[in-house]
Amino acid sequence: MTTYLPDTNILVDVLNDKNERRALLRKLVVEGHRLACCAVTVAEVYAGMRPHEALQTDLFLSSLVWYEDSREIARRAGRLRFDCARQGTTLSLADTLIAATVIEHGLTLITPNPKHFPMPEVALYPLPEGT
């Protein structure tokens, strides 16, 4: 069993029923895998949520396994951002926090933006190109 952390883009697509993301996550659950979220992905979803979407959003996000942030995750995120910047890649703090959460908890990230997570320690779920 693998625990997958869907990136915010994936969560938003599920809530908006786009890009067949709902079917992808359903397939993973049926196969016996778990789906997770963290403070950053939840905060980003709520930052773009309209008031009439609150109930559906609450229900969906509460079905995901919650992974706490920690001092170690914060430290790792800062180091990831620093190291990538020294290699010429500027990453958002939100993406490095997600990456650090994935690494710290041994999760697999589902993202349509693998370029935002160039760290070799981040396990990525292979989405088809252009999705």
Image (cartoon, rainbow, N blue to C red):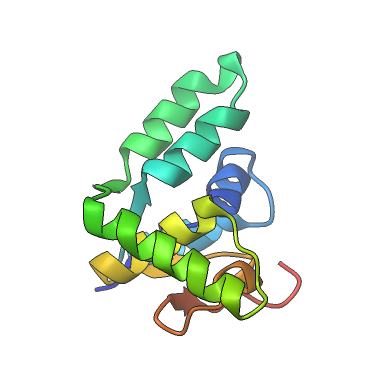
Residue beneath the point at 47% across and 35% down: 43
Q: Which image quarter holds the N terminus?
A: bottom left
Is residue 80 something one can see in this rendering? yes
3 to 84, vertically: above or below = above
Residue at coordinates 29% horizontally, 72% vertically from top-left? Answer: 2
> Residue 73, position in %: x, y?
30, 58
**Which residue reaches farthest bottom?**
120
Count of marks placed on residues: 0
Residue situated furthest front in the rendering:
86
Nearest the viewer among 66 and 97 is: 97
Residue 116 x %, y % = 61, 67
Seen from the viewer's position, the closer of residues 92 and 126 is 92
Q: Is residue 29 above or below residue 125?
A: above
Q: Does residue 31 show up? A: no
* Front residue of 91 and 106: 91
Question: 61 above or below 53?
Answer: below
Q: Position of residue 94 (x, y in %)?
A: 51, 50
Examine the image and state in which quarter residue 28 appears: bottom left
Dividing the picture into quarters, in which one does residue 106 lie?
A: bottom left
Q: Which residue is nearer to you in this view: 89 or 103?
A: 89
| Residue occupying image coordinates x 60% and y 62% | 91
| Quarter in which the C terminus is drawn | bottom right
Left or right: 117 in relation to 27: right
User: Horizontal and vertical percent for residue 117?
Assistant: 54, 71
Quarter residue 113 falls in? bottom right
